[in-house]
Amino acid sequence: MEKFETLNGVAAPLNIVNIDTDMIIPKQFLKTIKRTGLGKSLFYEMRYTQEGKELPEFVLNKTAYRKAQILVAGDNFGCGSSREHAPWALLDFGIRCVISTSFADIFYNNCFKNGILPIVVSPENLKKLLDDADRGSNATLTIDLPRQEIRGPDGGTVKFDIDPFRKHCLLNGLDDIGLSLEKVSSIDAFEKKQATAQPWL
């Protein structure tokens, strides 16, 4: 998993509440178990017509936001069914950070396991960040995970909280497999001891 330390990128405003996982990546795209190739289908029903043509009014289809790395969204982001394809699609598009006032628990947990930083802010701070994100290509935010702060284009700062263990995992690029590999020497020692003590197993 790619490490997350400091991200300086364009922030796209998506001021919609209750964005569920089916809106993020519709069910017809869940047939794959690959983590790549889903970015083109992110927010499919909001980004495209039924014929597959781009809807120019959707934020990620606008020139200024086509390479957005940060999403500033409305309350209760990631609700609905528990599909890991949702963070896969965000990440494949290029989104490394989602900012909202609240997240659905399963989606929130899946973000950390895939190298995406979900940040919870107050409604007042979300309004400020949405205003920053409305500036188009000038909507650049800096997400500083070590300092736990968001810095806006005018120098304003928003602090955020994060669980220390999850912070450690993101800073070091550790998913569940990476965490297990950190213990590989202890695992090897246990297996050797077990093989000696119980060779019939």
Image (cartoon, grey):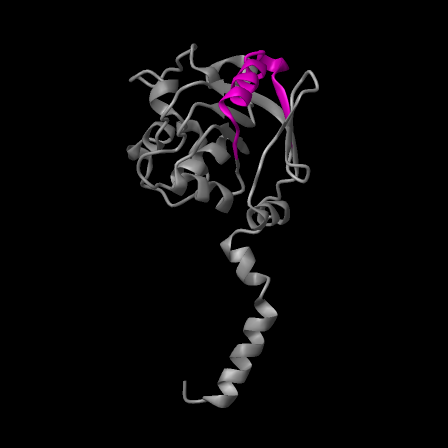
Residue 129 among magenta residues: yes
* Residue 70 screen position, x and y as percent: 55, 27
Extreme residue in the right direction: 155
Q: Which of 53 and 46 is in front in this view?
A: 46
The span picked out in magenta is: 119-143
Taking the image as shown, residue 139 lies to the left or right of residue 113, namely right
Q: In which quarter of the image is the C terminus?
A: bottom left
* 25 in magenta: no
Q: Measuring from the top left, give residue 80's x and y in whole percent.
A: 31, 35
Q: Is residue 84 visible?
A: no
Q: Is 199 left, or right, of 166 in this rendering?
A: left
Instruction: Give the image location of residue 30, x and y in percent.
Output: 33, 39
Q: Quadrant of residue 108?
A: top left
Residue 133, placed above or below residue 159: above
Quadrant assignment, res 54: top left
Is residue 2 placed above or below 119 in the rendered structure?
below
Image position of 60 (left or right of 6): left
Label total for image: 0
In front here: 79 or 179? 79
**Residue drawn where x is 48% and y is 40% of the image:** 111
Q: Position of residue 151 (x, y in %)?
A: 66, 25
Q: State whether residue 16 is above or below residue 184.
A: above
Q: In this view, does 158 lie to the left or right of 127?
A: right
Which residue shows up at 57% across the image and 12% down it? 136
